[in-house]
Amino acid sequence: MRPVRTATLLLALLPALALAQQPAPAADSDASSANSEEAATSKVPLEEIRRFVGVYNAVRAAYVDPVDDRKLMQDAVRGLLLDLDPHSTYFDKEDAEAFDEQANGAYEGIGVELQQQPDNSSLKVISPIDETPAARAGVLAGDLIIAIDGKPISAIKASEPLRGPAGSKVVLTLVREGKPKPFDVSLTRETIRVTSVRSRMLEPGYGYVRLSTFQADTGADFQKHVAQLSRQAGGQLKGLVLDLRSNPGGLLTAAVQVADDLLETGNIVSTRGRISISDARFDATPGDLLQGAPVMVLVDAGSASASEVLAGALRDNKRARVIGSRTFGKGSVQTVLPLDNGDSVKLTTARYFTPSGKSIQATGIVPEVELKRAAREGEDDLPASLSDFSEATLPGHLQGDGEGEEGYQAGDVLPGDGPIDDALAELKQPGSVAARLKAEAAKAEAAKAETKPEAEPEAKPEAKPEAKPEAKPAEPPTKP
């Protein structure tokens, strides 16, 4: 397994950053010594620069209220990234530190992964993190936060409005599918020390591992939990349910490490971008922690990014089967580029591809056995922002290779223990859950047909007396 060469990628992009942060070189500098990529990045049309400066000066001089130069320039840079895709963004120093804290698994807040909506009127919950205030309060993937402490999202300037000192309270106003009206949820912030791996025995010999996110220590923790389950099983597991539901992703290297721990050989994932250094390939090394015991991967609409990498790697290498619902479909890689003032830019630099060579961008992974959430009253009337939870619905998302294919339908969020029971049953007896679901669907269809009122017989037109033929005049007798 090759390590991620983030530092190398940063070095490759430094020419562009240097041009943005350093004074222009003297006119008599030796152009022939410039790197070709650096030269390409410097070819910004002069007319566009003049237009930008003109608007910038107009705002400084004529806007109704004075605007701080630094803030105005920061807003301009944010605007530069705004329309690229939903995952490229500008971090000020505070946000950059918070992003690093979350990746390392410790920060103060409520424990939820958020997606800013383009109209700036709501925050979509990608997923609550297990055993955090958000998860305990019942916040679900797909919920929309429309207000915090009674203040509309559009009026909140902080980009991390849910963070705050441990012990402080916050009230969220949520919109949820199936709920006729917005409702409030009160939470108390905590120091979130995310435990990304949990495990237990489902039945003698059959283990369960839950990965809630991928952070720096996820790979090592996964190894410890599998070893513990194996000991409880007497040295060898009969099978494993790997739960990736509502796992928003995280560090790609952590997902690659978990895949490597379950694979003997084969490709895990590859990435491809515009510059060669963005291209990488991760392959498995010998050594399977489960020694070939079957694996069932459980996913849903909240499974995104690195969790999709893991599910795709295990399925394409025929190491595991996948059960659940179509995944979120985030098939892009982001790189955090530090700036000289302490701020950072999170930039989408590549797409990733599963071992079969398929990009799951905006399409996701479709399980072999698809589970459905029970339909809820009023669901058909929901806006797409609630009823269709996927990358494909995010404005400005990168177009996927298979996007828009006939029959596409976004997945469901599958909470609770029911999907775990189905995953275990399918692990023990492949095909059993699919057969049961098919039988249940046929039974429901038959019941629906029986309860459907019989069509009333068509009213026959009222019988009319048969018209008598008109009497014909007697023919004159023929003459002899």
Image: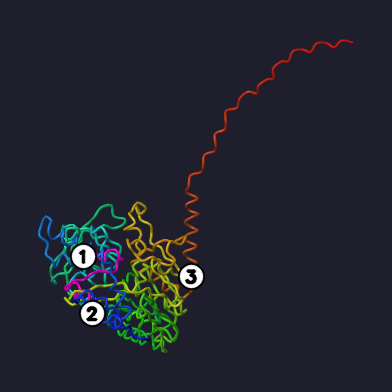
* Residue 97, x across and y down, in percent: 19, 76
Rendered view: 281 above or below 111: below
Magenta range is 77-99
The residue wearing badge 3 is 432
Q: Nearer the viewer, mark 3 or mark 1?
A: 1
223 magenta-colored: no
Classify mark 3: helix, strand or loop: helix
The numbered dot on residue 441 is: none
Numbered disc 2: secondary structure: loop
Residue 89 is a magenta residue = yes
Query: Is residue 325 in view from this perspective?
Result: no
Inspect the image, locate mark 3, and give the three-letter code of the amino acid beneath it.
Ser
288 up-or-down from 102: above or below: below
- Residue type at mark 1 is Ala
Mark 3 or mark 1: whose residue is earlier in sequence: 1
Numbered-mark total: 3
Which residue occupies the foreground of this view, 214 or 357? 357
Task: Provide the residue designation for mark 1.
Answer: 76
Q: Which colour scheme is used?
A: rainbow
In front of the other: 48 or 392: 48
Q: Please state which of the two labelled residues, at mark 2 or mark 3, is closer to the viewer.
A: 2
Q: Indicate which disc, 2 or 3, sits on the residue closer to the N terminus.
A: 2
Q: Where is residue 145 in the image (x, y as percent from the top left)?
A: 23, 60
Instruction: Measuring from the top left, give residue 431's x and y in whole percent.
Output: 49, 71
Q: Which label number is shown at residue 28?
A: 2
Residue 402 in the figure: left or right of residue 180? right
478 relative to 464 in the view: left or right: right
Q: Callout 3: 10 Å neighbours few (<14), some, many (20+)?
A: some
Rendered image quadrant of residue 125: bottom left
Split into 4 quadrants, where in the image is the N terminus?
bottom left
Relative vertical location of residue 182 with respect to residue 164 in this rendering, above or below: above
Q: Residue 107's quadrant in the figure? A: bottom left
